[in-house]
Image: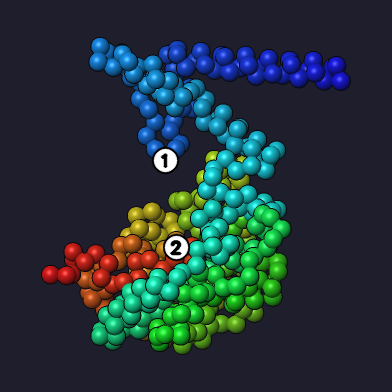
């Protein structure tokens, strides 16, 4: 016991000395190696070194302290080490927006209210939601365009068993299920929410992983099962799953974005492996693309156009979020043309110019039902 205390004191002294040396480096001219280590890896502007003047002498030391904290030598490595210790030893999240689940699964805090069913709509909110949808449906009906509203399930809706805690999923409908039931009971709007179909696939093929462990999205296998009900609703007969082959790959869907929850924890160098799939055999059609949202950030927030030699020559306008990116290969293979754009970039003028046969508005469950009123889609471009 005495030896352990002695060694513990030596280790603490050693760490203290390292920190002192590290601090001294902060007030010395930095060499290129230290500068490289101090590169900004945060999604904000780091403080710049203040100048001592007659006008700022009252605030100079507090400003310098902020600058020093932001530009601490080897700061990134110290932060990484701290985050890694929190995660590996204490099972603690270094980011309040990331939930540490069971068996290495991570979840976004922004899905917790959906999971706990603590954000249900009241009657007035449901009425407004439906009114927005009816306005949008009328817009498409007047143009002879089929309108489909699609909701992708949250990760913890499908993999609730990996959420922390023993209480499980609360009983009763979720906010999404509540809204969809209300829409179906009070309108003829086509709404697709493939929760049951994806859960059935998960049960039938337990060895297949449908969502990433360290990312908030479904992978291409999950997107395949999530897209099938949409295609069936549009009258497309897909190849049976027995014809599909796949290869496991370690690759996020949005390659320019990385595994987002691991990135948010600040330990993406440690959490860098997850399960995705390259699928083939799901179609006999050939597809060509102009742009690829999975590869280029500008295409993700902009548009992408895909063509196929399918016998179904209908044109689809696919307004999507990030979950829709992994749906595109399966959707694009079955129609003559699929024009895809991020839903936040929608404008009615472009819809008229594209003149699609089908318009699909896709949104992930956690993002609720916002922005579904066509009058909100860049009205400055068309409300003249």
User: For the view shown, which residue lies furthest in the right direction?
Assistant: 1
Q: Would residue 166 be visible to someone looking at this image?
A: yes
Asked which colour scheme the image uses, the reply is: rainbow
Task: Kindly identify the residue that appears in the image at 58 percent across and 62 percent down.
Answer: 116
Q: Nearer the viewer, residue 160 or 179?
A: 179
Give the quadrant of residue 213. Answer: bottom right
Q: Would residue 306 be visible to someone looking at this image?
A: no
Residue 282, percent from left and from top: 55, 76
Give the answer, above or below, for where 45 lies relative to 11: below
Q: Which residue is mark 1?
A: 43
Which quadrant is the C terminus positioned in? bottom left
Instruction: Name the secondary structure under disc 2.
Output: helix
Q: CA distance from mark 2 to mark 1?
A: 22 Å
Residue 149, percent from left and from top: 41, 76
Q: Which residue is mark 2?
A: 367
Give the answer, above or below, for where 375 lies relative to 313: above
Which quadrant is the N terminus positioned in? top right
- Which mark is first along the chain, 1 or 2? 1
Task: Kindly identify the residue that appears in the image at 60 percent across and 33 percent down.
Answer: 82
Give the answer, above or below, for where 356 lies relative to 121: below
Q: Residues within 10 Å of mark 1 (few under 14, many from 20)?
A: few
User: For the view shown, which residue lies furthest in the left direction?
Assistant: 384
The numbered dot on residue 111 is none
Q: Nearer the viewer, residue 338 or 189?
A: 189
Instruction: Name the secondary structure under disc 1.
Output: loop
Drawn side of residue 250 relative to residue 1, left or right:
left
Q: Residues within 10 Å of mark 2 (few under 14, many from 20)?
A: some
Drawn side of residue 40 relative to residue 213, left or right:
left
Task: Kindly identify the residue that appears in the image at 69 percent across and 55 percent down.
Answer: 165
Q: Nearer the viewer, mark 2 or mark 1?
A: 2
Give the quadrant of residue 368. Answer: bottom left
């Amino acid at each position: 016991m005495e030896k352990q205390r002695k060694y513990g004191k030596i280790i603490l002294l050693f760490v203290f000395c390292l920190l002192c040396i590290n601090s001294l480096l902060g007030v010395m001219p930095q060499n290129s190696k230290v500068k490289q280590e101090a590169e900004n890896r945060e999604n904000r502007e780091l403080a710049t070194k203040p100048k001592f003047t007659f006008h700022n002498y009252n605030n100079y030391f507090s400003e310098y302290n902020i600058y020093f904290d932001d530009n601490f030598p080897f700061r990134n490595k110290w932060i990484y080490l701290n985050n890694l210790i929190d995660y590996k030893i204490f099972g603690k999240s270094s980011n309040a927006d990331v939930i540490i689940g069971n068996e290495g699964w991570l979840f976004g805090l922004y899905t917790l209210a959906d999971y706990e069913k603590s954000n249900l709509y009241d009657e007035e909110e449901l009425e407004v939601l439906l009114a927005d949808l009816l306005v949008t449906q009328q817009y498409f009906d007047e143009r002879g365009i089929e309108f489909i509203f699609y909701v992708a399930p949250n990760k913890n809706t499908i993999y609730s068993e990996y959420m922390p805690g023993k209480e499980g999923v609360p009983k009763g409908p979720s906010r999404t299920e509540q809204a969809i039931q209300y829409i179906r009971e009070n309108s003829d709007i086509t709404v697709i929410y493939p929760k049951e179909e994806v859960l059935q696939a998960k049960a039938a093929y337990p060895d297949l992983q449908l969502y990433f462990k360290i990312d908030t999205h479904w992978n291409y296998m999950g997107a395949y099962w999530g897209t099938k009900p949409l295609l069936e609703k549009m009258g497309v007969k897909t190849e049976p799953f027995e014809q599909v082959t796949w290869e496991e790959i370690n690759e996020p869907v949005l390659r320019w974005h990385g595994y987002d929850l691991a990135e948010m924890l600040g330990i993406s160098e440690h959490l860098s492996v997850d399960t995705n799939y390259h699928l083939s055999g799901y179609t006999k059609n050939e597809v060509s693309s102009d742009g690829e949202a999975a590869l280029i950030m500008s295409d993700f927030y902009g548009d992408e156009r895909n063509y196929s030699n399918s016998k179904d020559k209908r044109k689809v306008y696919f307004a999507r979020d990030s979950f829709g990116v992994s749906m595109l290969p399966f959707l694009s293979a079955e129609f003559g043309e699929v024009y895809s754009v991020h839903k936040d970039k929608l404008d009615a003028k472009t819809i008229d110019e594209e003149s699609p046969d089908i318009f699909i508005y896709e949104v992930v469950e956690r993002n609720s039902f916002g922005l579904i009123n066509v009058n909100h889609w860049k009205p400055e471009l068309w409300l003249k």
